[in-house]
Every structure is written in C-alpha cells, then in structure tokens.
Image: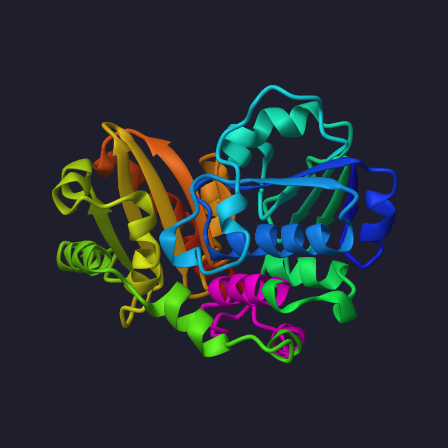
Amino acid sequence: MELKTDMSIELKEILKGKRKVALGGHVRPDGDCVGSCMGLYLYLKEEYPQIDTDVYLEPVPESYRMIAGTDEVKSEIAAQEPYDLFICLDCGDEQRLGFSAPLFDAAKETLCIDHHVSNDAFADSNYIVPDASSTSELVYRLLDEEKITKPVAEALYMGIVHDTGVFQYSCTSPETMEIAASLMRKGINGSEIIDKTYYEKTYIQNQILGRALLESMLIMDKQCIVSVIRQRSMEFFQAEPSDLEGIVSQLRQTKGVEVAIFLHEMQPQLFKVSLRSKGKVDVSEIAKYFGGGGHVRAAGVTMKGSSHDVINNITGRIALQMKRMKEQEEKA
C-alpha cells in the first residue's frame, strides 16, 4: 500500500481508462463527508461525462440537501459488475464505509482520500494528509481550479466550514483560508451555506441539545464534561442520530473543560462516543485504543457496556494521558 502526503496523486491519471467509478463516505455522513463526496461527484459528472459515476452514502441529513446532486445519492447497493475504481472519502478505515464496503472490496482499484491521523492507508492508493483541515480541502487540491463550477464550490466550501468549525479550529491553516476564498470567488453564497448547514437547528435539535446540556456532568476535577442521550430520549423527542450533531462541540465550549465526552445510546449496552479536546489531550489516541479513530481534537468510537463502564474506561485513558504529560513537564 502506498501512502501519499503530497500532490503526487493526479486525478486524471487515476481516472485514465476507467468506465465505472463509485464514491463512498463514512457512516452517519457529516458536513465534510457529504461536501467532499458531492464536490468530487459533481466534478466527475461535469468533467468526465464518459465515466459512469455513482455516489453511495447513508441518507443525507436534510440540512445538507441544499447541495446539488444529493438527490442522486444511492443509499443501498444492487447486484452489478464491479466498479473499475472505488474512491472512499473522509473514511479512517474500511469498516467506516458501512453498507458500501462490499463495493469497495469488489472494485478493481481503490483510492482513499482522507485526513484522519488514525488512517492506516487501507486502499490501493492513498492520499492522506492528517494536517489538512478537511477531506474537502484535499479534494480541492486534486481538482483543476479553473474547472471548478459553482455547485462543486458550494459542496467543498460546506465541507471545509464544518470540519473547521467555521474556520475557528486549529486545523484551519492559511492555505485553508486561501482555498475558501478561491471557492467564494466562484460566486457561492458563503454566509447562506454556513447559516443553513452549520448554525440553523430544528426545534427538535434544540430540544435534544437542551436535554444534553441540562443533564451534563463535570468530572475529573471539572476538567471533563460528559453527557448521555439515551434511546428513550430519542424516542420522546422523535429525534434522529443526525439531530445530535454539534452537541459534543457545544459541550467542549464549557469554560475550564479540557475534554468533552458525549454518549449516544444506539441500543441497550451499545454507545456511540464522541470526543472533543481543547488541545492538551489527544482524543484520537483514546478512540483508537478502543477501536475507533479521528483527530487529535475530535474523535469517536463505538463501545459496548453500561454508560458508567464506558465513561470510566474513557476517563481512565484521559487520566493516563494527563499523568504522562505532567511527568514530562516535571522532567523538563
């Protein structure tokens, strides 16, 4: 397997001779996943009409449906000939592809475009840059800037906006801002994309956020905040998993907190755990220890057990990291 961390991958070379290409993103697609997949999909449809291109994602959240082409997304697979190329985007490992993983396995050639530090280069070719703000930024780097149309720009801009927290996270580099400016020059309405896909919340989303904040707890000498949303709450509010997006980031903003932990009960004794750090704690290391992955400041994992067990296991790893850092500081 080949790990690429520079511009040595050329899209036109990879697409040479391909007749059928599939794109796929991770389960429970977020803004960057949808933005990178749709940006590349629209570009291929426009610039390579001779290639039969499909995009596979779980149902796209309503807030992202302002992006062109989302009505063409396939959320299930049918029996067919293997694709010449499967491009997975924003996926730290093959399992995260979910329902489209069999298409990846059957494809004649595979490419992974990603920015997760936990990615171990599982495709035939890999364009992985952990320092990049988003997978959407990496897709932009692979495209011919002059051929990027307004619909493509809207998709990529949305992806960058979401994974940078509207350009406020530490992953936002000068190059990220320059790329965003280039996309804005395509005539997109950047403020509308930010408002409608990032800030705007439904009444149900605000209700479930309120419950998560109201029932949150400060632990570990108030260095950590944790909240749990159980199945019964999801049923009471008639909420979908996509309605929980942004809750852990809101928890992280609590003054004095270093790490935010948000648990979503998917079924009895099974939790999706979202982790956010302000910088001192590497939550990707913690998530990877339990079989998940992500970034230094944002990561996730699915864990079995009671909520009490899950929280104890996570905080135990956080405590070990903090102890290690303290020992290093004392030696210095």
Magenta stretch, residue numbers: 152-181
Seen in the image, is 268 located left or right of residue 32?
left
Pick out the residue farthest to the top: 79
Q: Nearer the viewer, residue 246 or 259?
A: 246
Q: How is the image coloured?
A: rainbow
* Residue 156, placed above or below residue 2: below
* Residue 227, placed above or below residue 188: above
| Main secondary structure of the magenta stretch | helix
Percent across and percent down for residue 223 are: 29, 62
Percent across and percent down for residue 204 are: 20, 55
At a point 56% along the width and 31% down the height, the residue shown is 100
At a point 80% along the width and 51% down the height, the residue shown is 11
Pick out the residue farthest to the front: 49
Percent across and percent down for residue 314 are: 35, 43
Question: For residue 164: magenta?
Answer: yes
* Residue 8, placed above or below residue 305: below
